[in-house]
């Protein structure tokens, strides 16, 4: 083999090795990364439930969603239930029960005590129970999620009451976070 042929052969072998190494096919170790690894996704922190159940809805929520004026409710010292009255027939009742069975029973008690005429059941997804109903003087939504039960009541029969109650319910569920969740 002449010196020129040997030089060309070595250059071809060197070029082939470089190409194979670049493709990660050289068989020596792991391939070199072609791009930096992606960072793990970050998620916002889990919201914490409010210290006062009456903070689950504010007078501003009733104004912006239901076009109803409400006053700030008096805070309650109870740790498992509270009645937040924002105005005449404008309220939020919240219960944290000891078991899911007790929560189911509480929904039945609320519906019987109304007297709420059930208009629709299973109005909302992502909850265990939801009932939209009316009384002669109000419209309401009762929700059960795990051991949390709450009722939102609006005075009279406002136009589009059901979607307004659904929006208010969404706020309560968002702010309640894991309140009443079973472990």
Image (cartoon, rainbow, N blue to C red):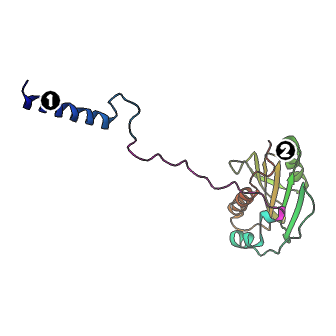
Q: Residue furthest top?
A: 1
In the displayed structure image, the side of residue 105 where residue 171 appears, left or right: left
Percent coordinates x, y for residue 132 in the rendering: 76, 55
Task: Name the residue nearer the viewer: 150 or 138.
Answer: 150
Percent coordinates x, y for residue 84 in the rendering: 86, 65
Residue bearing mark 2 = 104
Bounds of the magenta span?
Answer: 33-54
Percent coordinates x, y for residue 135 in the rendering: 83, 60
Label 2: which secondary element: helix
Which residue is found at the position 70% from the left and 51% from the top? 123
In the displayed structure image, the side of residue 19 where residue 9 appears, left or right: left
Marks 1/2 in contact by CB < 8 Å: the verdict is: no
In the displayed structure image, the side of residue 171 where residue 136 appears, left or right: right
Residue bearing mark 1 = 9
Label 1: which secondary element: helix
Task: Name the residue nearer the viewer: 168 or 10.
Answer: 10
Image quarter of residue 46: bottom right
């Amino acid at each position: 083999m002449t010196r020129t042929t040997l030089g060309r052969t070595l250059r071809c072998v060197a070029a082939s090795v470089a190409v194979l190494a670049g493709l990660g096919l050289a068989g020596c170790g792991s391939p070199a990364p072609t791009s930096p690894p992606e960072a793990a996704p970050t998620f916002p922190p889990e919201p914490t439930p409010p210290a006062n159940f009456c903070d689950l809805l504010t007078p501003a929520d009733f104004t912006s969603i239901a076009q109803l004026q409400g006053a700030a409710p008096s805070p309650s010292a109870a740790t498992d239930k509270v009645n937040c009255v924002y105005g005449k027939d404008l309220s939020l009742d919240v219960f944290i029960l000891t078991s899911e069975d007790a929560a189911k029973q509480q929904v039945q008690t609320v519906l019987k005590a109304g007297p709420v005429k059930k208009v629709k059941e299973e109005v909302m997804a992502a909850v265990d129970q939801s009932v939209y109903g009316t009384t002669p003087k109000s419209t309401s939504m009762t929700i059960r999620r795990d051991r949390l039960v709450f009722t939102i009541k609006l005075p009279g029969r406002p136009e589009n009451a059901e979607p307004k109650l659904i929006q208010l319910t969404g706020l309560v569920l968002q702010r309640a976070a894991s309140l009443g969740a079973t472990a």
